[in-house]
Amino acid sequence: MAARHVRIAPGGRVVIPAEFRKALGLAVGDDVVIEIKDGELRLRSLREAVRRAQEIVRKHVPEGVSLADELIAERRAEAAREAGEE
């Protein structure tokens, strides 16, 4: 998709052109993530940001391991320890 020229409106508002919103799957009211990287303002859908985070974590978690299950087990063990200390 070709770059577009947009103007910053009062209050720092920028209108994202319709074709860009469509390409990103964005609708009115959606949350987005913005960051400054390499001197550029970058914007992505929250859905894409979560997908990227999951991809990064997946590289460091062995196949067949559930981080959710491990966290639940740790919390239960901690609760059992606290119950025994009281």
Image: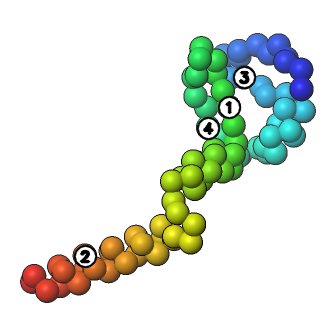
User: Eyeballing the image, is 50 above or below 42?
Assistant: below
Q: Is mark 4 on a helix, strand or loop?
A: strand
**Mark identifier at residue 33:** 4
Q: Which amino acid does label 2 sit on?
A: Glu
Q: Nearer the viewer, mark 2 or mark 3?
A: 2
Disc on res. 65? none
* Residue 73 relative to residue 64: left or right: left
Residue 18 image position (x, y, % from top left): 88, 33
Dot 4 or dot 2: first in sequence order is 4
Label 1 sits on residue? 43
Please tell me which residue is depicted at 61% across the width and 32% down the height of the picture.
Answer: 34
Q: Say left or right for 77 vs 41.
A: left
Residue pushed farthest left? 86
Residue 81 at what x, y percent from top left? 18, 80
How far across and down, in percent of the image, does residue 62 sit? 52, 63
Query: Which residue bears the numbered disc 3?
Result: 14
State the image quarter where residue 5 is shown. Answer: top right
Tell me where residue 33 sits by quadrant: top right
